[in-house]
Image (cartoon, helix red, strand yellow):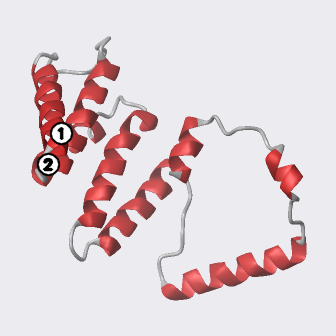
Amino acid sequence: AKGVLAFSSASFYALHGIKRMPQSWVGDENIQLAVKLHSIAAEAERSLGNLSHAKLLCDTIIKQNHLPLFDKLKAHKILIDMLIHKEDNFDVSLEYTLDLMGKTVGLHFPRSKVGQGLAALRAIKQMKMEKTIPSSDEIENLPMMTDPMRMFGIE
């Protein structure tokens, strides 16, 4: 019950903040605040089961052409989570994710079973050729990852 109350409050205050924002985000000095409020509201609405309202809030962020990709990633993640948790929509969420990776980062993955099999064989062959497995000391001494885009990709 406390969780539902917390999400209800988060949604209420985020939506109230959105209503007080200017209608157009273009050139607005509060654009980061608008993105944050929409993301918080979308996440809260998703958690409350209001999936259509959460999708509408995410779409509002994603449709802002002037926003950089990084500002849209949270909205994409919420949409992917919603697709995964809908019954029988894992394939749809996978397609959405693969399309997003292709459009945004330039990573293109094979879609067919044959293409996936060939890619796996190619990767195994390359691993056998390289035969360089880093030691635990080498891994431990790697620099901390700080690039937010790569960190999001791993997530």
Q: Amino acid at mark 1?
A: Phe
> Residue 35 placed where, x, y %?
30, 28
> Residue 137 placed where, x, y %?
88, 51
Q: Can I make out residue 68 in this image?
A: yes
Rendered residue at 84%/56% (across/down): 136
Rendered residue at 64%/34% (across/down): 146
Check if mark 2's residue and mark 1's residue have beta carbons within 8 Å.
yes
Task: For label 2, count other residues whose C-alpha is less than 10 Å away and answer few (under 14), some (14-19) or many (20+).
Answer: some
Above or below: residue 12 compared with residue 150: above
Q: Can I make out residue 56 in this image?
A: no
Q: Who comes first in sequence, dot 2 or dot 1?
A: 1
Task: Work out how far the residue at label 2 is from the one at label 1, CA to CA, in angstroms.
Answer: 7 Å
> Residue 62 placed where, x, y %?
29, 41
Residue found at the far top of this picture? 29
Above or below: residue 14 compared with residue 105: above
Left/right placement of residue 104 relative to residue 54 reads right
In the structure shown, which secondary structural element does the residue marked by tag 1 occupy? helix
Task: For label 1, count other residues whose C-alpha is less than 10 Å away and answer few (under 14), some (14-19) or many (20+).
Answer: some
In the structure shown, which secondary structural element does the residue marked by tag 2 occupy? helix
Q: Which residue is mark 2?
A: 48
Left/right placement of residue 7 relative to residue 68 reads left
Quadrant assignment, res 12: top left
Q: Which residue is mark 1?
A: 7
